[in-house]
Image (cartoon, rainbow, N blue to C red):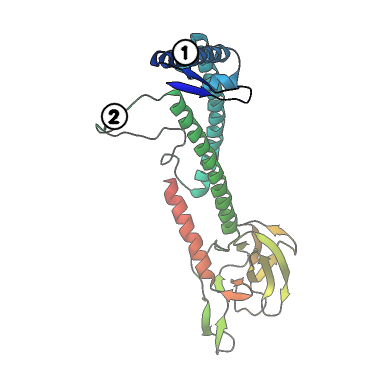
Amino acid sequence: MQIILMHTRFTQAKSVTLSSRHVILGALCFLTIITVCAAMMAALTLRLASADLPLLRDLVPAAAASPVAKDRYLKENLAAMAVKLGEMQAQLIRLDALGERVQGLAGVKPEEFNFKELPARGGPEVASAPAHELNMAEFQAALDAMAKGVEQRSDYMNVVETKLMGFKLQSKLLPTIQPVNVSYNASGFGWRLDPFSGRSAFHEGIDFPGATGTPIVAAAGGVVVAAEFHPQFGNMLEIDHGGEIMTRYAHTSRIYVKVGDIVKRGQHVADIGSTGRSTGAHLHFEVHVKGVPQNPHKFLSAGANQANLASLSQK
């Protein structure tokens, strides 16, 4: 091989002849220099990785590090996982308490869903997918995924508890319990013959017959909006239950609450009487929704069904 050299300083071109021996020696020298540089870089990296430099230590695989570095790496990972495990235990304790509250609101029996017992599990081994031991990276990924799942389920349970609590409070504000303890009603909701005129007239409530002085209780919790004498209804009591729902108790002999009082569900608020336009001692009970009279039997029957379900769940 002949190389021709030309330059302005040269008066004439010069040539250099390289034999195959020179080319082979040059290539061997180049490869030797590269090998020495790579070895020096590897040694320097391993030395820095054994020092307390997290960035470089993470770049070096645990298998290539020294025993001291591997031991420190394992201890640090175990410490981080112990912290994560402690956080998960605290979240599980909170989740158990939240689950018991939701369980009580939903009416689920404790023996049917016990948060403190591990669920039964099982299944055959699959030959086509043999089991293998988890490495550190897989274990850390599984732990992180579980922590995220626990947090998401805790948020979901909080939403469910809020909804169930709202439904329970709303159900307590619905007039679903019978206001007097009698076995039948004398006159139902709808068209009937008026007992005074004998003409067909619409009856906007239910009449419960009973002896004078028989206790009348609030069909649901609410605020008293009327407690007065009415020419037709006699001593009349009206309770606002929210949600534009109102109940009326008429012909009472005595009223024990006044306007503005907050009454509880089942609270003794009046006594049966025969005041106003009445033929005898009874309670005239009405339910109004948005100012429109509704059949009280729909609400009372719903309350009776809920009571039956509650008694069955406790057996």
Q: Residue at x 46, y 59 (%)?
A: 305
Tell me the quarter of the image containing the N terminus. Answer: top left
Up/down of 80 relative to 106, above or below: above
Q: Amino acid at mark 2?
A: Pro
Quarter of image, res 151? top right
Q: Position of residue 119 (x, y in %)?
A: 39, 35
Q: Residues within 10 Å of mark 1 (few under 14, many from 20)?
A: few
Q: Under tag 1, what secondary structure? A: helix
Q: Nearer the viewer, residue 121 or 309?
A: 121
- The spot of residue 123 in percent (x, y) is 29, 34
Q: Is residue 126 above or below residue 53?
A: below
Q: From the image, tell me which residue sits under label 2.
A: 130
Closer to the camera in the image, 81 or 260: 81
Element type where label 2 sits in the image = loop
Identity, as a three-letter code, of the amino acid under mark 1? Cys
**Residue 165 image point, x, y percent:** 58, 51
Q: Which residue is mark 1?
A: 29
Q: Residue at x 57, y 23 (%)?
A: 12
Q: CA distance from mark 1 to mark 2?
A: 51 Å
